[in-house]
Amino acid sequence: MSRIKVAIVEDDAEFRQRFARIVQDSEQLELVGTADTARTGYALIERKLADIYLVDLGLPDENGINLIRRIAASQPNAAVMVVTVFGDDDHVVRSIQAGATGYLLKDALPEEMVGCIRALYEGGSPVSPVIARRVLSLFRSTAPAPGPSAPNPLTQRETEVLTLVAKGLSFAEIGASLEISQFTVIAHVRKIYQKLAVHSRGEAVFEARQMGLLR
Amino acid sequence: MTPRALLLALTLLLCSGWPAAGAQTASTHHDTVETLRNARVLVEPYQDTLTPPDPTNPQWRDTPTAERQLNPSLQLMRVWFAFQFQVHDPVDQPWALLLTRLYSGGTVFLNGLPVGEVASSSPVAQANWLRPHQFTLAITGLRQGTNTLLVAVPSRYGQIGIGLPSVGPQDLIQPLYERRHFWEYTVALVSVWLLMVAAFCLLAIWLWRRQEVLYGLFGLAILAWGIRTIHHVWTVIPLSLWVAWRTVYYAATGFGVVLLCMFVLRAGGLRWRWAERLTLAYAAIGPLATLLLGGRFEFWEVPWYAGAIALIGITAVITWYRAATRRTTRALALTLPASTVFIAFLHDYIVKANAGALDHMYIAHAVAPMVVLIMCLVMLVRFVQSLNRVEGINHELEQRVRAREAELHANHESLLRMELRQASSAERQRIMQDMHDGLGSQLLSSLAMVERGGAGQHEVAQVLRECIDDMRLVLDALSPDDCDLLSALGTLRYRMAPRLAAAGIALEWQIDSAQDSLELEPRHALAVLRIVQEGIANVFKHSRATRLSVHIATTADALRIDLQDNGCGFAQSRTRSGDIPPSGHGLTHMRRRAAAMGAELDIASATDGTRISLRKPLVLGYPLLAG
């Protein structure tokens, strides 16, 4: 089994080294590069080496969101994990909207971190109850708005999944509760991530039009 | 000049205009209209047949025309008046005879031929024509030289007279007749209607507002005046009703006068109970005596009137005195009714008592509308004044209410602001206390541990992790967009699950809750979260358990959380790394936190596992500002 290729964009040397060490220590992972600024980050992603990118948002020269957007646009087969302190801030949702499909807590234990990266690589996307609630309220708030803003794009099943995630249930328990397989639940979650990203792009276009940038 | 004063002046002008207009008519065409001052009179018992008596009858007497013939028996008599007048020039138009006081009706003959008849007193009726009569004297009936007029008057009054007859060309007599007819009849008719309508309105007001006694008094007074004035328009009265009608008439006159006086005095703020009762009793004498004596009261009528006139005179003097001392428009206005009525009554009294000398008409009925007018004005002013006062009071009241409302609103606002400030400051204090007791002391103790050099990397990492976990709980509990404990517990579970899995502990998580969310005060939510987290931490730190079951149940009035593991219990617990045993700080903290939020905490530990049960009673609704 080939190793999962991981690249790290993180300005804090302490964390960068910690993440690098965990990746290097793991038999399942392979470190293909690190960057400490957005500029070096762009150079890193140009080489298209990694399967998984760990990206911190608070880079000294530029917001990591643009980096995530670039990766999502140029490397559909790669996945982005945003690095976050608590996993419940708005940055996570905005990163997901930019194209990230997972997030990593800065204090994650080595085994947790490896597990997360593996899960993401295998197509799973982690969703914490807090993120699920944020996403639900995000779509709920846009739902009744008429006009170019799209109606709630989530299906009823996807909403049910998110609601159960928000209550702290595991994917297995959600599957049992909804009488579907755990993998179907994971597929729903992936779909939700995609919709979140598409939705945000639609909104970006709408906003651009509003601002007169697009005709 | 205020509008009120203007109105008053107008009224005065109107009033003064009336008698003046009447006076003018008397002097017009004096030269060509002849007043017949001398007559011959013959009194005979009443007979059904009307035959002019023989001019040579020795009972004919010469007399001044205006002088009344006495009829002490009050029997129905027929009095014959004969006059002579001269026609010198050839007559080219009809002449006319004006009889001003043919009150009992009668028949007129010119040169022996009848020229007119007015329904007269008879054995079955009593005539009461308080108005003038005009008889046309045709050209063909007049002679050059001496003409003789003969007037037959059937009457049962004690004094019988016809006033001063006037004779002359009809176009000169006609205006005299019309003027007098207007003042004696038309005005009386108008008065009756006016007084009745005004009385009705005033009494209606009084009935609705019984405390407005003045309206009632005045209404009754003018009702009496209205009834009395019917006397001027009801001409031929069946004899069977005569005494009854006279009784009503005297009652109306007496009470009309007394009530008017009472009204005027009370309106001026004077009220003498005994005087009022005495005068009312005096007023009652007239009608009562009429009932007792019948027509005979006619002989005492004049002195009785004199008493009433004296009453009005006294009242008038009092009102004038008040007006002089008070000097208000109102007091001045109140002098008018009593004075006017006094003058009118005095005039009528003189006419009645000494009719021979005067050919005047009665005027009391004509001043009634004027009195009503003045008094209505006084009432109106009073009404408008009280309306203004009420409106002023209302306005002031409204303003006061509005000011009070604004004040209350401001108070309420500041109270609310203060409460919010207190609440948020209390909340801030709690969080600070929390940071101080929890994170702060944990960080300090780990700092001491590191500085002592006795701490290995593992210990330091563990302490810091605990700090971070605690901070996460604080953030979860204080999260501004949801105060939902169930969500926060879900987050806690999500966070702990990988660690439990890594430690080889199977987690069974069960929620029995009818509702989707459970709102708690942030500090209580935090306490619950800490107890649960502490419980879970104990399990994988000390218990060597392989299974942990967390059961969360909510009912309408309580929250219950049970943590059950299959570990070795506290007694056997020996930590992997020699930590403080859980019966120490950890459990103490849990108990203290439960007590602080009014919850029960049961800890049962045995060799085959430990059970921690938390039961917290719920208050209905979320007490936002509860201390």
Image (cartoon, helix red, strand yellow):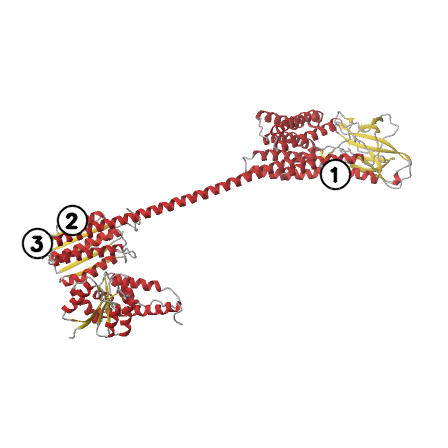
Identify which residue, B120 or B165, lies in the foreground. Answer: B165
Tell me where residue B57 appears, x and y as whole percent. Answer: 87, 27
Using the image, name the chain to which the residue with label 3 belongs.
Answer: B
Q: CA distance from mark 1 to mark 3?
A: 132 Å
- Residue under numbered circle 3: B572
For label 3, the SS is helix
Q: CA distance from mark 3 to mark 2?
A: 19 Å
- Residue under numbered circle 2: B588
Q: Earlier in the sequence, mark 3 or mark 2?
A: 3
Q: Please report contact status of discs 1 and 3: CB closer than 8 Å, yes or no.
A: no
Kindly indicate the quadrant of the structure image that contains residue A14: bottom left
Identify which residue, B431 or A9, lies in the foreground. Answer: A9
- Residue under numbered circle 1: B182
Using the image, name the chain to which the residue with label 1 belongs.
Answer: B
Residue type for callout 3: Gln
For label 1, the SS is helix
Q: Residues within 10 Å of mark 2 (few under 14, many from 20)?
A: few
Tell me where residue B244 appears, x and y as whole percent. Answer: 67, 32
Residue type for callout 1: Phe
